[in-house]
Image (cartoon, rainbow, N blue to C red):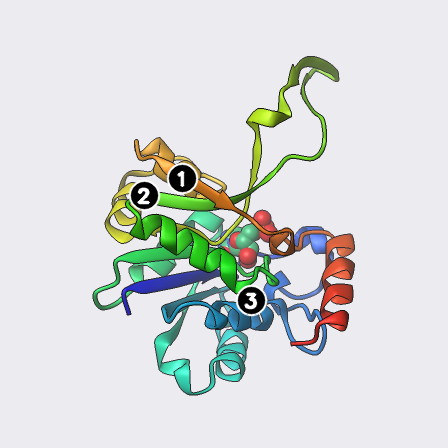
């Protein structure tokens, strides 16, 4: 396929307080990774690379087999690193064939729906080097230093970044080859390499499951709309 999706699932999930890596925590009887893969597979046909925590590659393969069925030959599982950036790099190294567009997606955004995958791909096909889904910032934001407000920040200038984030493969590979610092998302890394990253509409369902309250929200959404 021309499109690849790297699903990063190698985080520990410390903030969730679970006793296993976050991607394998159940939303219902299915894990976050399984839900994320189901949505990825509802999107355009793509090669999929799952980046699993060291020691949990077998759990990832179990989810892949259950979610992908006879499309499993499009999916590979590799071992992640100690930072998200290292995990994405491991996923990039595992791409094969003539992929031209690479999406990077957090397994923790397990309910991100198929249309956002289509929107970021469409932006790359229309000529952007990179494209990410964003939502407007709802809260009033303050810049804080030393325990007090030092500036108000105009929230109309701000957007909250989500995944899947899409890039031309050559742009993303070159940006990773020169990236030094530890970036928290791929858009920042690609922008630091001098490229322009476009924005498309995000989706409230693409929230990142981080805290126990986020997990409760995901569970109630899935209970109303089972897999
Ligand atoms: O921790 P956080 O939820 O912000 O991580 C975002 C995504 O990056 C998650 O899907 C997580 O599994 C992944 N990640 C990773 N490797 C790491 C850290 C995070 O694949 N070392």
Q: Secondary structure at mark 1?
A: strand
> Whole-Å distance between the Cαs marked 2 and 1?
7 Å
SS type, badge 3: helix
Q: Is residue 78 left or right of residue 42?
A: left
Q: Which mark is residue 188?
A: none
153 sits left or right of 63 in the view: right
Instruction: Give how far apart the Cα atoms at labels 1 and 3 are.
Output: 23 Å
Choose top left, top right, bottom left or bottom right for residue 99.
bottom left
Q: Residue furthest left?
A: 98
- Please say if the residues under marks 1 and 3 sit with CB atoms less than 8 Å apart: no
143, above or below 26, in the image: above
Taking the spot 78% from the left edge, 60% from the top edge, the residue there is 216
Please report contact status of discs 3 and 2: CB closer than 8 Å, yes or no: no
Are circles 2 and 1 on residues that touch, CB within 8 Å?
Answer: yes
Q: Which mark is residue 128?
A: 2
Could you tell me which residue is drawn at 30 percent across and 52 percent down?
Answer: 125
State whether residue 193 appears in this view: yes
Q: Position of residue 156 (x, y in %)?
A: 60, 26
* Viewer-closest of 190 and 147: 190
Residue for badge 1 = 198
Displayed quadrant of residue 147 = top right
Q: Earlier in the sequence, mark 3 or mark 2?
A: 3
What residue is shown at x 72% (from left), y 26% (from top)?
140
Distance in Å between CA atoms under marks 3 and 2: 25 Å
Q: Which residue is mark 3?
A: 36
User: In front: 98, or 87?
Assistant: 98
Q: How many marks?
A: 3
Place of residue 151 in the rendered image (x, y in percent of width and height, measured from the top left): 66, 13
Lower position in the chain sequence, tag 2 or tag 1: 2
* Pointer 1 residue Cβ closer than 8 Å to ligand 1: no
Q: Quadrant of the N terminus?
A: bottom left
């Amino acid at each position: 396929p021309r499109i690849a999706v790297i699903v990063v699932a190698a985080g520990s999930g410390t903030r969730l307080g679970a006793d296993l890596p976050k991607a394998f925590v159940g939303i219902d009887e299915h894990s976050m990774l399984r839900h994320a893969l189901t949505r990825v597979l509802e999107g355009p046909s793509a090669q999929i690379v799952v980046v699993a925590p060291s020691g949990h590659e077998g759990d990832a393969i179990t989810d892949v087999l259950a979610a992908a069925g006879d499309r499993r030959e499009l999916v590979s599982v590799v071992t992640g690193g100690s930072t998200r950036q290292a995990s994405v790099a491991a996923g990039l190294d595992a791409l094969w064939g003539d992929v031209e567009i690479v999406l990077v997606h957090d397994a923790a955004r397990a309910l991100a729906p198929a249309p956002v995958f289509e929107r970021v791909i469409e932006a790359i096909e229309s000529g952007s080097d990179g494209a990410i889904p964003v939502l407007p910032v709802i809260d009033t934001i303050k810049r804080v230093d030393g325990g007090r407000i030092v500036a108000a920040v105009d929230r109309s200038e701000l957007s909250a970044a989500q995944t899947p984030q899409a890039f031309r493969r050559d742009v993303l590979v070159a940006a990773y080859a020169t990236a030094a610092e530890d970036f928290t998302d791929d858009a920042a890394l690609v922008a630091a390499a001098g490229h322009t990253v476009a924005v498309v509409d995000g989706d409230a369902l693409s929230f990142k499951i981080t805290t126990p309250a986020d997990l409760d929200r995901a569970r109630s959404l899935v209970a109303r709309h089972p897999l």
